[in-house]
Amino acid sequence: MDASAAVWGVIGVVGGAIITGIVQLIVSKADYTQKIQETCIALITPLQNRIEELDTELKDWKNWAERLVKQVKKLGQEPVPFISSKKDS
């Protein structure tokens, strides 16, 4: 084996190692990205479900309050005004 063949052999091994390392980095980055995405979805989904439940409950309360106001007015009385407990910022 002459020197040039040995040099090309070493270059091939080093090049292969570099390419393998780069591919592994890309795959690892994709795996991390996917894991982060899955974790975010796992955290967001229950919160989104709870928001939907609260939204439905709020609609039910508003419907009940509207019917109660109509009932109070039908009896000739004036219902108390609604006062928001939301803090002004």
Image: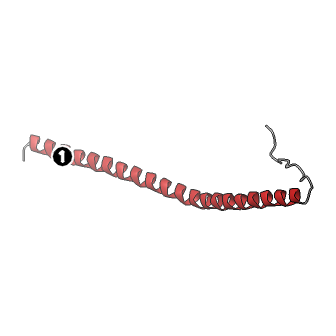
Q: Residue at x 87, y 56 (%)?
A: 73
- Where is residue 53, by image quadrant? bottom right
Q: Residue furthest top?
A: 89
3 and 78: which is toward the camera: 78
- Residue 18 on image: x %, y %: 28, 45
The number of numbered badges drawn on the structure is 1
Q: Residue at x 41, y 55 (%)?
A: 31
Q: Is 76 on the left-hand or right-hand side of 65?
A: right
Q: Is 59 on the left-hand or right-hand side of 19?
A: right
**Judging from the image, what secondary structure is the residue with disc 1 in?**
helix
Q: Residue at x 85, y 49 (%)?
A: 82
Which quadrant would the C terminus be assigned to in this image? top right
- Residue 22 on image: x %, y %: 32, 46
Q: Residue furthest right?
A: 77
- Determine crowd level at label 1: few under 14, some 14-19, many 20+ residues with C-alpha closer than 10 A: few
Q: Residue at x 71, y 62 (%)?
A: 57
50 and 2: which is toward the camera: 50
Q: Amino acid at mark 1?
A: Gly
Q: Is 61 on the left-hand or right-hand side of 20?
A: right
Residue that mark 1 sits on: 12
Q: How is the image coloured?
A: secondary structure
- Residue 44 on image: x %, y %: 58, 56
- Residue 26 on image: x %, y %: 35, 48
